[in-house]
Image: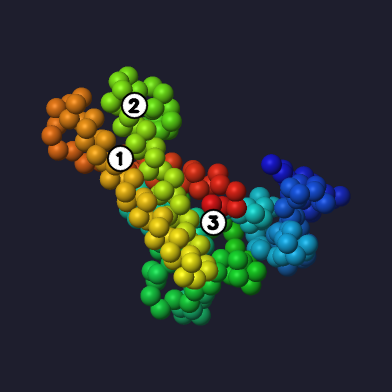
């Protein structure tokens, strides 16, 4: 993974070495008497073999966040779960009292904010610039979960029934991540083929989720004597956490 290195003087930093496949872009300080600490961020577009301006900030560190930045949905859920954890793909904007309001949204939430204009995230960045997770209402919150990663839970399961339950829950992760990916892809490129892919992914997730819920019910019945049981919110949040991690680990943001 490329790291930030200082250029020929203190006012420029490069993400990786220029001319290599890992090179990502650079940030540059604009010196001036009226505003001496302004940093501009430029991202390297390998397909066009050119740099593109993607944002400005008051510090080098903030400007660096904009280069190859990871943008998350800004929809607020509640105090327990915080914001939606899925990747942002569109920017909704509204001119209000002379100020341009904006909100980054994932594909699933791209329909909220009725009456607001819609721009692809890439188009918005090239026109206005954007720093990841700046100005989010309430701050970015990661729900606290004491539960271990699912793979670790599988290895440490004391009984076969519990092990099978964790395996069933693990199978839910990928279909959930795929569903959210295709939702985002469909929001950016609203073509019929993308909509079908999303519907297929959603159907697969529903089927696997039902199987996992059934396995959890079996575990509760055999280990704890409970006849009826549904997946608790903690396990649903754990599945979501694992799905987000899976999405971030996929090449190209998938």
> Do labels 3 and 1 touch, CB within 8 Å?
no
Quickly name the residue at label 2: 163
Marks 2 and 3 sit apart, C-alpha to C-alpha, by 35 Å
Quickly name the residue at label 1: 212
Q: How many marks?
A: 3
Front residue of 205 and 41:
205
- Secondary structure beneath dot 2 equals helix
Query: Which residue lies at the image location 65% right of the left edge and 63% below the top edge?
Result: 55
- The mark closer to the camera, 2 or 3, is 2
Quickly name the residue at label 3: 71
- Secondary structure beneath dot 3 equals loop
Q: Residues within 10 Å of mark 2 (few under 14, many from 20)?
A: some
Q: Residues within 10 Å of mark 1 (few under 14, many from 20)?
A: many
Q: Is residue 182 above or below residue 158?
A: below
Query: Which residue lies at the image location 14% right of the left edge and 38% below the top edge?
Result: 228
* Farthest top residue in view: 158
Residue 138: x and y in percent read 41, 55
């Amino acid at each position: 993974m490329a790291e930030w290195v200082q250029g020929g003087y203190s006012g420029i930093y490069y993400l990786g070495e220029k001319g290599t496949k890992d090179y990502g872009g650079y940030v540059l300080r604009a010196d001036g008497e009226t505003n001496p600490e302004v940093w501009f961020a430029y991202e390297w577009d390998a397909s066009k073999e050119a740099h593109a301006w993607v944002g400005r900030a008051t510090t080098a560190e903030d400007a660096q966040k904009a280069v190859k930045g990871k943008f998350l949905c800004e929809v607020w859920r509640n105090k327990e779960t915080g914001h939606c954890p899925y990747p942002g793909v569109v920017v909704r904007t509204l001119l209000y009292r002379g100020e341009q309001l904006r909100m980054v949204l994932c594909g699933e939430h791209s329909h909220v904010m009725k009456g607001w204009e819609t721009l692809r995230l890439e188009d918005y960045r090239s026109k206005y610039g954007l720093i990841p997770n700046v100005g989010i209402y309430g701050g970015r919150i990661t729900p606290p979960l004491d539960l271990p990663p699912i793979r670790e839970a599988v290895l440490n399961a004391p009984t076969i029934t519990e092990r099978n339950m964790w395996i069933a829950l693990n199978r839910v992760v990928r279909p959930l991540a795929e569903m959210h990916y295709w939702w985002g892809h469909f929001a950016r490129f609203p073509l019929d083929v993308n909509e079908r892919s999303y519907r297929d992914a959603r159907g697969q997730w529903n089927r696997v989720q039902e199987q996992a819920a059934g396995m959890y019910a079996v575990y509760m019945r055999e280990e704890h004597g409970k006849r009826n049981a549904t997946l608790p919110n903690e396990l649903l949040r754990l599945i979501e956490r694992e799905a987000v991690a899976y999405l971030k680990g996929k090449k190209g943001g998938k």
